[in-house]
Image (tube, rainbow, N blue to C red):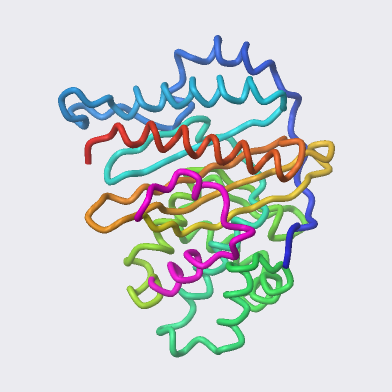
Amino acid sequence: MIRHDHSRGPVQGPRSSRRLLLRSALPAAAALAGVTARPGAAQAQTPTDAELSTELFERVADYLATTGTETEASVKMQRGTRFVGTYARRIHDTASIVKMEILLMLLEKYSTMAAIPQTRKDQARNMIVWSDNAATTELYNFLGGCDALQAAHERYGLAYTNVSDDCRWGLTTTNVGDQLLILNQLLYKGRLTQEKVDYARWLMGGVASVQAWGIRAAKRTGETVWLKNGWDSRSSLGGLWVVHSCGVITSPGQTAIRMAILTSKAPNESRGIEIVEEIARISRSIIDKTVV
């Protein structure tokens, strides 16, 4: 079972006091969320996307202030036409969540599922279900490596996602908005056929139980979760961790919740997971206020 990406990320600048940031940034919370208020978008008595994003900004900042850590977090959610987020433009190393994009590249390459060689399907399953790094590297190289991945960023409309200088896939950088774009293209028909979408959902719905944390903490009884998580320590962060969770929470007859949570500077993997899961619960309580 794979537990680490064993990759290293870019240097980030010094961190300001979270409480000071909260006080000084509050008027701009909606802008930080990457959300623009849309006239007439909300139902009567329903908070707007900007109002919900401000609430998310405040509650996540208040929670992080209680953790005794340096953790920085970004969130973006979509439910129907509603978008809610906080620090949505902040850039993070991907670690293993880039495996979703590599899966999308593989599925896009072939005309049908039957055309994909069984060896590549086995590698894809190991990459998503077990987060196997060796299988990921095999697929990454097969698909064209660094140049192909950067071309995919552009093809998929990922304006804030870039390959690393040394072309290691785990050091790709991204933000939560771009990860929502990947979820939308991988798990919903459009770029892919329904057959391929069903395959991606099968893989992301069957992640090994030891790795099935993160946004699953926001799941309600009877709901289904498709997810991919990422985690690794970073020498550029002084040995602190990036811990991420991206995916979809869905159930029959309900509008799905698409959620990306990226965090940097957790002290270790287990603490990072705890923080991501609490942020997922906070985020769910807020996106549930939308009327869709």
How many numbered circles does the render carry?
Answer: 0
> Where in the figure is residue 129, as x and y percent of width and height?
59, 68
Residue name at image x 35 percent, y 38 percent: 83
The one nearer the camera, 178 or 43, is 43
Residue 89 drawn above or below residue 221:
above
Residue name at image x 50 percent, y 57 percent: 227
Image quadrant for the C terminus? top left
> Where in the figure is residue 285, as x and y percent of width and height?
39, 33
Side of 183 where 60 appears, left or right: right
Image quadrant for the N terminus? bottom right
Residue 114 drawn above or below residue 265:
below
Quarter occupied by residue 147: bottom right
Q: Give the range drawn in magenta.
A: 198-222
Quarter occupied by residue 148: bottom right
- Residue 216 belongs to magenta span: yes
Residue 187 drawn above or below residue 219:
below
Quarter occupied by residue 119: bottom right
> Where in the figure is residue 273, as x and y percent of width and height?
64, 43
Query: Hey, which residue is sitting farthest front in the picture?
Result: 221
> Where in the figure is residue 63, as x and y percent of width and height?
57, 24
Side of 147 where 219 appears, left or right: left
Question: What main secondary structure does the magenta stretch of the protein show?
Answer: helix
Residue 56 drawn above or below residue 125:
above
- Residue 49 belongs to magenta span: no
Residue name at image x 80 percent, y 57 percent: 6
